[in-house]
Image (cartoon, helix red, strand yellow):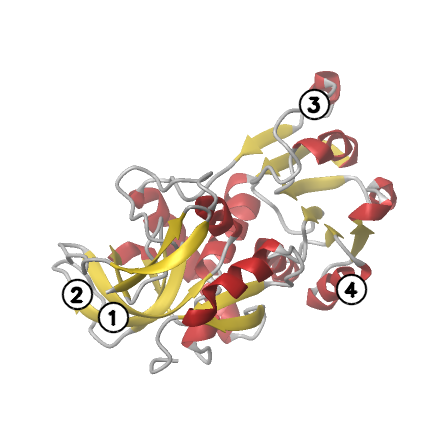
Amino acid sequence: MQALQGVEGGVQWVQRPNPDCDVGQIRIQVAAAGLNRADLLQRAGLYPPPPGASDIMGLECAGVVTEVGAGSAWQVGDRVCALLAGGGMAEEVVVDAGHALPVPDGLSLLEAAALPEVYATAWLNLYQLAGLRPGEKVLVHAGASGVGSAAIQLCKALGNPCWVSVGSPERLAYCVALGAQGGVVRTEGLDALRDFAPFDVILDPVGASYAQSNLQLLAVDGRWVLIGLMGGREVQFDLGMLLVKRVQLLGSTLRNRDELFKADLLRDLRQHVWPLFSEGRLKPQLEKVFAAKDVEAAFAALASNQVNGKLVLSINDSLT
């Protein structure tokens, strides 16, 4: 089969063996795969897959089930999307049956490919780890990103006022249209966020450069969930403020979680989040679809940090 592999800082379609489908697994003929910042890091050699995971690019995909291992309730022909530790940017992928979700009613496979990674990340960090309660206030850094877009929509649907930091006025307008109450453009500084503070939860993919501001903006008993290091990994800040405010600092990753954890997470998503798509309260934020032959352009667009929502790579046009 054709599969996308990182090669010396670039990406290349290569021939790879078709994976075996074992007990408790399903084989998916891939229609499309979502792009994520983790793919950029893997391409650069900075984010290798966890032990035992495929080194093929792609942390999420959507397609059609073509084979079902023993012990799975899926049927051949089911339209699914899947959360992966790797392997999504290929003609087919084999995945734990518990890591797949049905394509929500009314959505295409292209749209569904943009869902698993960002909604799993937003739900895990805001509602499972941070324990966000109705009415609590949220600050989402990089609000126009894929995860940010999902987080804003979840907050709106579940009764949590949400503010953002973003890279431009246009991206701020995009976030407000999704449901954010307001926010700031990062080049103008984060100080204006004090007008909306204190925040009960901050979802932070930035890290070091925002650390001191996060402490100042958090409420007593606030939760700071760190999910990325775009702004650096080393910082000095006053631990006294962390102590006095009783702030919880939570470091969180998803890709290297074990299979049981991911299956439980997706079961929770199916119960609490997936119905919101059918109700029209959540919508995929798919900015652009790239053909497989244009994969370098897709990665360049992602690296530009100018994407609102998600980019998707079309693998099999006959399915979409």
Amino acid bearing label 2: Val
- Which residue position is annotated with label 1? 65
Q: Quadrant of residue 300?
A: bottom right
Alpha carbon of mark 3 to alpha carbon of mark 4: how far?
A: 34 Å
Foreground tag (3 vs 1): 1
Alpha carbon of mark 1 to alpha carbon of mark 4: how far?
A: 39 Å
- Which residue position is annotated with label 3? 242
Alpha carbon of mark 2 to alpha carbon of mark 4: how far?
A: 45 Å
Residue depicted at 29% across the width and 48% down the height: 54
Q: Secondary structure under badge 1?
A: strand
Q: Secondary structure under badge 3?
A: helix
- Residue found at the far front of this picture: 8
Mark on residue 170? 4
Lower sequence index among marks 1 and 4: 1
Alpha carbon of mark 2 to alpha carbon of mark 3: how far?
A: 50 Å
Alpha carbon of mark 3 to alpha carbon of mark 1: how far?
A: 48 Å
Foreground tag (2 vs 4): 4
Q: Secondary structure under badge 2?
A: strand
Amino acid bearing label 4: Glu
- Which residue position is annotated with label 2? 68
Q: Quadrant of residue 228?
A: top right
Amino acid bearing label 1: Val
Residue depicted at 81% across the width and 51% down the height: 184
Q: Are marks 1 and 2 in contact (CB under 8 Å)?
A: yes
The image position of residue 47, as x and y in percent, is 44, 40
Q: Residues within 10 Å of mark 3 (few under 14, many from 20)?
A: some
